[in-house]
Amino acid sequence: MQQTLNWQEQLPEGLSEKLQWLMQQPSLTAALRSLDTSFSVRLLHLGLSESRGWFSDRHFPAQVFSREVLLCLSGQPVVWARSVCEADDAVWHEVLDCGTQPLGERLFNGALPLVRTPFEYCSCGHVVLPYENALSIAARRSVFSLNGNRLGLVEYFLDDFE
């Protein structure tokens, strides 16, 4: 991803109330499930990749281990998400290698002593994502820390979300 985004601590203006609510929820998995019990995850990629600027200002190296998924409601993709960690970070590799299980179930089950940064948000209607040239309307990102090791998580809400 070569597009430059303006990440901020405040929610972007002009979003629907539902999208504003979702973007502020600690667990997007739990929030989406509350909207539609047929919530599902579609795994797109798991393995080594280039960081491609998703977290360039967060000092992740050029090559990372990543997981890319689509979060779906009633089979319709509504969020494209990417998680990245250091290429040789065995602890985060194990957490990310969860197939179509939502990552949120692992992150928020209370078993991991995680620390999370505050969310950063951006309005990004111009951003073309690597999934079938999908367009996003807004995004959020944060970084989790587990015993000093970092996991970056970015979630893009797709243009046909509403």
Image (cartoon, rainbow, N blue to C red):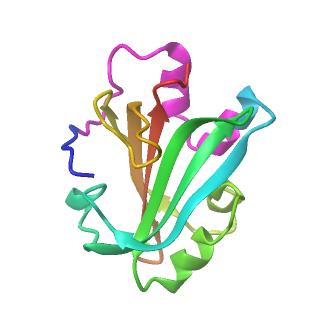
Position of residue 115 relative to residue 4, above or below, is: below
Q: Which residues are magenta?
A: 7-32
Where is residue 56 shown, x and y percent of the image? 22, 60
The residue nearer to you, when weighing 112 against 81, is: 81
**For the point 69% across and 41% down, which residue is it?**
30
Does the stretch in magenta take in 101? no
Is 20 inside the magenta-drawn segment?
A: yes
Q: Is residue 119 visible?
A: no
Asked whether, in this view, residue 29 is left or right of residue 13, the answer is: right
**In the depicted view, which residue is nearer to us: 85 or 77?**
77
Q: Is residue 143 above or below residue 138?
A: below
78 left or right, relative to 37? left
User: How many numbered tags mark residues here?
Assistant: 0
Residue 120: quadrant of the picture? top left
Name which residue lies at 52% across and 85% down: 90
Rendered-image quadrant of the C terminus = top right
The reply to whether residue 54 is in sight is yes
Which picture quadrant has residue 137? top left
Q: Seen in the image, is 25 located left or right of residue 137?
A: right
Percent x, y for residue 5?
22, 40
In depth, the one of 148 and 35 nearer the eye is 35
Q: Residue furthest front?
A: 132
Expressed as whole percent of the image width and height from the top left, the position of residue 2 reads 21, 51
Task: State the residue at coordinates (56%, 53%).
Answer: 69
Left or right: 64 with respect to 113?
left
**Residue 93, horizontal then vertical, whole percent:** 54, 77
